Amino acid sequence: MSRSGADLALLLLGGFRTLVDAATAELARSGHEDVRPVHDFAIRAIAAGADTASELGRRLSITKQSAAKTIAVLQERGYVARDTDPLDARRKRLQVTALGLDMLRQGETIFDELRDQWAQQIGIAELENLETQLAAMVGAQPVRFDTPGWLTHDLGEPV
């Protein structure tokens, strides 16, 4: 059966959504019921050096205001903290907390388990072939941090 290009895009998006929804549900069962997919992107960007709202906004391709809202939510939930910059006491820098790092580790473990489930469904050789083919088509680099802004085209909606 021949599919259209749009069908391919929707299948790829559906695969992403299936994995992310399952991981989000499992994280909720393990005590992180307040985590959303955009939070993972934000926490990873902060861990990689986006230590201000401006920088987080740039890395996620969202407005500074949207970044500030995301930061406020992550702080309230204990995943990130603002600490005084050791070089400039007037400046506060973001950092991922132990809880945030634990959530990321749990999420990675969950994604590994979901990958194993897919391997059981279609066979490990088929899954590895799929991964190889996708990497050849889109590149071996993981999705960029700016995916949240790209998905929403930075509508400034709450996260």
Image (cartoon, rainbow, N blue to C red):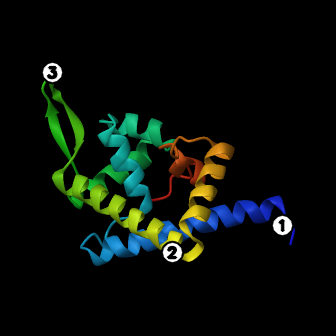
| Residue where numbered disc 1 is placed | 3
Q: Earlier in the sequence, mark 2 or mark 1?
A: 1
Q: Is residue 58 left or right of residue 140?
A: left
| Residue where numbered disc 2 is placed | 120
| Residue where numbered disc 3 is placed | 87
Q: Is residue 29 left or right of residue 144?
A: left
**What separation in Å lies between label 1 and label 3 (alpha carbons)?**
57 Å
**What separation in Å lies between label 2 and label 1 (alpha carbons)?**
25 Å
| Image quadrant assignment for residue 38 | bottom left
From the image, which quarter does the N terminus lie in? bottom right
| Crowd tier of the residue under label 3, counting other residues whose Cα lies within 10 Å: few below 14, some 14–19, many 20 or above | few
Q: Work out whether 95 lies above or below 101.
A: above
Q: Earlier in the sequence, mark 1 or mark 3?
A: 1
* Nearest-to-viewer mark from 3 and 2: 2
Q: Amino acid at mark 3?
A: Leu
Q: Are marks 3 and 2 in contact (CB under 8 Å)?
A: no
| Picture coordinates of residue 36, whole percent (x, y) | 40, 64
| Picture coordinates of residue 123, whole percent (x, y) | 57, 70
Q: Work out whether 22 lies above or below 159.
A: below
46 or 117: nearer the viewer: 117
| Image quadrant assignment for residue 34 | bottom left
Q: Amino acid at mark 1?
A: Arg
From the image, which quarter does the C terminus lie in? bottom left
* Nearest-to-viewer mark from 1 and 3: 1
Q: Amino acid at mark 2?
A: Gln
